[in-house]
């Protein structure tokens, strides 16, 4: 079972949760071969309804004591650009897509994502471009298709 894990850490990032759980995004994720999507939604107000079909499962939770197990099991991590979340995924060697929260003032998240992308560690985008982008793990590296 191929799994994608989405985390917003201890914050709320409703735009990311709404974007990734939209029907077109779910279809794209499933079409890329993922059978399971786990959403860690933090203190957000967008709470997608979990579901399970023969070919796809959506799980949703707010917090756990540790995200290490979900990150370990994930084939792809989609995260806000919090330093802790990024480093935890990268330390586990997971392909990482960082979604920038454009609503933050003095956006340090964008600076971090740009630098880590420049060094070849991740891809980054905004919620507005997430659904239009296919991100896949191919031949040992993360590949982005627009």
Image (tube, rainbow, N blue to C red):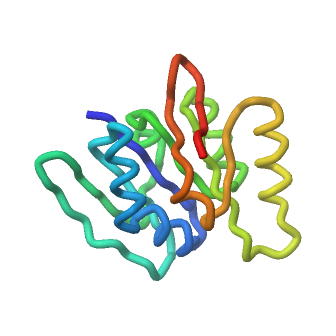
Q: Is residue 107 above or below residue 43?
A: above
**Residue 89 or 111: which is nearer the viewer?**
111
Image coords of residue 69 (percent x, y): 40, 39
Q: Residue at x 29, y 46 (%)?
A: 36
**Residue 26 or 92: which is nearer the viewer?**
26
Of all residues, the one furthest to the front in this rendering is 146
Image coords of residue 20 (percent x, y): 46, 61
Q: Is residue 15 above or below residue 39?
A: below
Q: Residue at x 56, y 73 (%)?
A: 15
- Residue 138 in the figure: left or right of residue 38: right
Of all residues, the one furthest to the top in this rendering is 139
Image coords of residue 97 (percent x, y): 60, 45
Quarter holding the N terminus? top left
Image coords of residue 123 (percent x, y): 67, 42
Mark count: 0
Q: Residue at x 76, y 48 (%)?
A: 113
Q: Residue at x 40, y 68 (%)?
A: 22
Residue 11's image quarter? bottom right
Of all residues, the one furthest to the left in this rendering is 54
């Amino acid at each position: 079972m191929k799994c994608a894990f989405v985390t917003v850490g201890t914050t709320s990032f409703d735009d990311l949760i709404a974007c990734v759980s939209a029907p077109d995004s779910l279809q794209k994720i499933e079409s890329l071969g993922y059978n399971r999507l786990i959403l860690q939604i933090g203190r957000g107000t967008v709470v997608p309804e979990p579901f399970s079909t023969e070919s796809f499962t959506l799980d949703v939770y707010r917090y756990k004591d540790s995200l290490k197990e979900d990150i370990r099991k994930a084939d792809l991590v989609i995260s806000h650009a919090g330093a802790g979340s990024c480093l935890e995924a990268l330390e586990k060697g997971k392909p990482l897509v960082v979604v920038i929260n454009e609503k933050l003032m003095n956006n340090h998240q964008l600076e971090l994502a740009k630098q880590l992308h420049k060094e070849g560690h991740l891809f980054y985008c905004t919620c507005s471009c997430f659904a239009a982008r296919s991100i896949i793990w191919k031949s040992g590296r993360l590949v982005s298709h627009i």
